[in-house]
Amino acid sequence: MPHDHDHSHSLLPPDPALRVRALETILTEKGLIDPAALDEIIDTYQSRIGPQIGAEVVARMWADDAFRQEMLTDPMPRLQDMEMYGRQGEHMVFVENTDAVHNVVVCTLCSCYPWPLLGIPPGWYKSDAYRARVVREPRAVLADFGIVVPEDKKVRVWDSTAEIRYLVVPQRPEGTDGMNIEGLAELVSRDSMIGTGLAKAPTA
Ligand code: FE
């Protein structure tokens, strides 16, 4: 029997947002999820948890060498004390940019990301193009983000996993001596902590 394809095989709507809504409705009706709990999680990651948290950690690492050493060697106890801890960030590893190395983070398998410190990942982080290319040609990808890494500087790509989430510690910009933590944190962008950006220069 001929089978023409001007109809959809799926009863679900084509728009992803509508599909998510349909799925949420089904799961709620079956008693598998509590919509209030779901709203709470979404609100937490949309409005309360974001890159400003990671930026504060980086700024403190720049300002306080004992804290910096702690973050580079055994960060989890202190992050838990500071309540910068939670799902998708149970095992953080801080990788520090230096004059010799520039670090960049990816999840080649999916989109693993340090949620408690950076919030929800940007769309490009989850894209097939970024995930495939940053491993093969990291310098070209960084150039697309506007970063030209000198040939004598090593580029190291860190592949996140379900267990380990990396956060890049960008280099502290020139001209920031004497700035307080709050001022320093404003220089630390989300992308600088993924490695696709640099810390901003202070405005005079
Ligand atoms: Fe992943």
Image: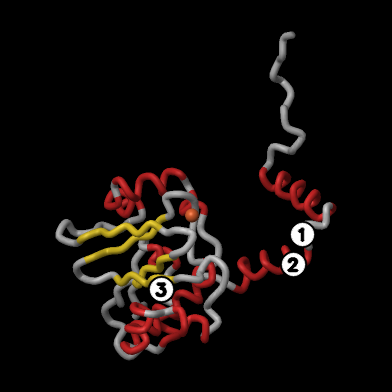
Crowding at dot 1, Cα within 10 Å, few <14 / some 14-19 / many 20+, comes out as some
Query: In this picture, is 100 found above or below 181?
Result: above
Front in this rendered view, residue 100 or 33: 33
Residue at 39% across, 81% down: 59
Residue at 33% across, 89% down: 66
Task: Residue under label 2, please give it.
Answer: 37
Mark closer to the observer (2, 1): 1
Q: Helix, strand or loop at disc 2?
A: helix
Mark closer to the observer (2, 3): 2
Q: Is mark 2 within 8 Å of ligand 1?
A: no
The picture places residue 52, in percent across and down from the top left corner, at 50, 75
Residue at 38% across, 57% down: 159
Quadrant housing residue 95: bottom left
Task: Residue under label 3, please give it.
Answer: 188
The picture places residue 92, in percent across and down from the top left corner, at 44, 71
Q: Helix, strand or loop at disc 1?
A: loop
As measured in the structure, the alpha-carbon distance from the residue carrying label 2 to the one carrying label 3 is 31 Å
**Residue contact between numbered discs 2 and 1, judged by CB atoms under 8 Å:** yes
Query: The disc labelled 1 sits on which kind of residue?
Result: Ile
Mark closer to the observer (3, 1): 1
Quadrant housing residue 189: bottom left
The circle drawn on residue 78 is none
The circle drawn on residue 33 is 1
Q: Residue furthest top?
A: 1
Q: The N terminus appears in which quarter of the rendering?
A: top right
Q: Earlier in the sequence, mark 3 or mark 1?
A: 1
Q: The C terminus appears in which quarter of the rendering?
A: bottom left
